[in-house]
Amino acid sequence: MKELKDRILAEGRALNEDILKVDSFINHQVDMELMSAIGKEFAEHFKDLGITKVITIESSGIIPAGMTALELGVPLVILKKASSNVLNDDMIHTEVTSFTKGNSYELSLCKRYITENDHVLFIDDFLANGEAATGVIRLLRMLHATMAGIGILIEKTFQPGRGKLEDAGFEVYSLARIKKLEAGSIEFMD
Ligand code: G4P
């Protein structure tokens, strides 16, 4: 997606070979016009798949996923990372390990919001190792729902996320595919 790639080149900062900072328009301050265009792009790409819900993980996925859900006319479900101290039998959980952040967290979903009739689109800001997406797939399987596809704003193609997800049979559609990062330089795939 040209608008996103142009913005990454103009404002993104490669901190090192692994991490791209996009705090001025995605992760901290958010450009809502860009998010609206991203929602339209994902909705157009996935419109014929019979999607019943869009799912994402708090926090940076919420706005692009919400824009996509709005365009598709379906609800948005937000997976929670923080554990709630209110006991709730309706919640299911799975553990996700983040290699980028060097931590593990529990993803939680209330059973009432996804059923076996749901065909779900997962949207997230970054794809690195694919661990978050794999955790979402595990939760959907527990509820016998199906994954329609995975929409990513920024994919780091030098990390194994896409390979893992495609090998498991899922479509990954990324709006910007980064081939290489170096302090001060960003190279796209195409
Ligand atoms: P994975 O799911 O593909 O395995 O990714 P990983 O666990 O490695 O990523 C963990 C967190 O780090 C995610 O944010 C992800 O968006 C973020 N992340 C990964 N690579 C980059 C990067 O190059 N730049 C930036 N800015 N973030 C990156 P999170 O912990 O879910 O936080 P939030 O921002 O959504 O709250």
Image (tube, rainbow, N blue to C red):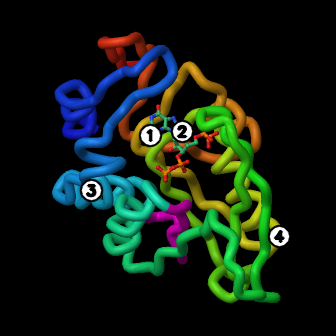
- Which is nearer the N-term, disc 1 or disc 3? 3
Q: Is mark 1 within 8 Å of ligand 1?
A: no
Which quadrant would residue 120 be assigned to in this image?
A: bottom right
Residue drawn where x is 69% and y is 63% of the image: 107
Residue 50 among magenta residues: yes
Task: Please state which amino acid type lies under the numbered disc 2.
Answer: Leu
Task: Please state which amino acid type lies under the numbered disc 3.
Answer: Met
Residue drawn where x is 32% and y is 71% of the image: 71
Q: What distance separates the C-alpha of mark 1 from that of mark 2?
A: 9 Å
Residue, disc 4: 142
Residue drawn where x is 68% and y is 77% of the image: 84
Residue, disc 3: 35
- Which is nearer the N-term, disc 4 or disc 3? 3
Residue, disc 1: 174
Whether residue 173 is situated above or below residue 147 in the rendered picture: above
Residue, disc 2: 127
Q: What distance separates the C-alpha of mark 4 from that of mark 2?
A: 23 Å
Q: Which residues are magenta?
A: 47-58
Numbered disc 1: secondary structure: strand
* Circle 3 crowding by C-alpha within 10 Å: few under 14, some 14–19, many from 20: many
- Circles 4 and 3: CB atoms closer than 8 Å: no
- Circles 1 and 4: CB atoms closer than 8 Å: no
